[in-house]
Amino acid sequence: MSHVVQGYNPRTGEPFGEPVAKTPDSEVDRIASAAAVAFSAWSVVPAADRAVVLEKVADALDGESSLLVETADGETALGVPRLTTELKRTTNQLRLFAEVLREGSYVEATLDTANPDIIPPRPVLRRVLRPLGTVAVFSASNFPFAFSVAGGDTASALASGCSVVVKAHSAHPSTSRETARVVVDALREAGAPEGVFGIVYGTESGVALVKHPAVRAVGFTGSTGGGRALFDLAQGRPDPIPFYGELGSVNPTVILPGAAEREDIAAGFAASLTMGVGQFCTNPGLVFTPEALVPALGEAVAATTGGAMLNERMCDSYTASTDALAASDLVTVVSAGTRPDEAWAVAPRLFSVPVSVFEENLEKLTEEHFGPAALAVTYSDPAELHSVLAKLPGTLTGTVHAEASDHAEAGEIAEVLRHVAGRIIFNAWPTGVAVAWGQHHGGPWPSTTNPLHTSVGATSIRRWIAPVTYQSWPDALLPAELRDANPLGIPRRIDGVLGVH
């Protein structure tokens, strides 16, 4: 067994960068234990001061953007323009959490005054959300910045007051190492406690991390199989811990008859399908469409060019699964795009199936093909879709394309989709997840392991904080968020009334 993690260039299949040593269990223990010690100091740093630290980390990453993007492109083949945008999204995410900390409502400060005249009598109760401890973060393959070392899980966990240990993804170890170097240096320069952020490498280190007693929660973005294995490990500990996994998603898109007449609909679909070589968790893998639109969708996909997948395993898996689908007697092969002459490159593919056949073979035909492949499910009457949409597995997004003539039907379909999807999109494509206060990036199993929480947006911080109620404590001994004078000036709910008081 190799003792190093080696990155590869997906365009050539050749090794890229220097190999990174796998982290032995003894070093995982040291890093996790150091993170636990750092948590004690970091968790009591005032939120406004943590905000400044996050902004300094963002500035440092921006300052090293050329090196980071060049390294990531060599290991992922995602292209300099895409990676430049992704890194900026990553640093903007850190800055968003600085805003969250300064605004303060994320702690949900709740104060009840005493009332001895009700039954049962009410003492003085003051509730606030407090950080859990050390968080293990698993990097994603398809977003080497935004969902990896300094990505959303790390940003939100550090913002909450938790310490973080990242398990680097094996597809981009050099990118992970360089990003971690920048983060560690920036945290140290900003005065954060030593050990508040650490990183480990290798599959075995990830297992050891989830099992480590110092780890109090886990964030994961990746495959359903890998996520389920780690989820079971987290739940099987003597002290089970929360596991927040973002896993598989087929992202159904419904094109209603009026929208099928739009000239831009086929090109928009093909662009979304092939973005990032289809390696997006929000890739529109299922499109429910009038049969008359299928030729245009096929022409749009045929006009596209694929690209190199992130690693050889993903390339082989995509090829095997789409070849098997093409060879089945359930679907029709509509078209394929061009496969470039690169080592781990694939071609976009479009298949079609009548809605009746799809519904009869739902489990088999909702299998995710991680890459630029989609299944067009054809229908004659939108009423045919209601029962089948309700049976879909949990998904991150559900999309409806409609014109004014379709609005009544669109509303009914949205009501069905909200039970299976975490974000309902109207007249847009699901690829692209804005980092904002109102974002929700989650959904029922298997899209995530916990549909109540998001991995993107301001409220993703809730994963790493838990409620504590202080009963009858002296004002001077309370956290600042709960003191009578509200020294932080944050929104609070007092006797049921929300405001800044």
Image (spheres, helix red, strand yellow):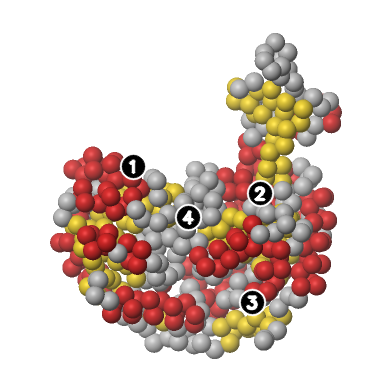
| Circles 3 and 2 in contact, beta carbons < 8 Å | no
Query: Where is residue 378 drawn, in percent x and y?
Result: 21, 60
Q: Residue at x 23, y 63 (%)?
A: 357
The reply to whether residue 270 is in sight is no
Foreground tag (3 vs 2): 2
> In this figure, what is the number of numbered marks?
4
Q: Earlier in the sequence, mark 3 or mark 4?
A: 3
Query: Which of 78 and 407 lies nearest the eye of the viewer?
Result: 407
Q: Residue at x 39, y 80 (%)?
A: 320
Q: Residue at x 63, y 83 (%)?
A: 6
Foreground tag (3 vs 4): 4
- Choose top left, top right, bottom left or bottom right for residue 57: bottom right
**Which residue is identified by label 3?**
174
Q: Earlier in the sequence, mark 2 or mark 4?
A: 4
**Which residue is identified by label 1?**
415
Judge whether 342 appears above or below 150 on screen. below
Q: Check disc 2 and give the amino acid type.
A: Trp
Distance from label 3 to label 4 (Cα)?
32 Å
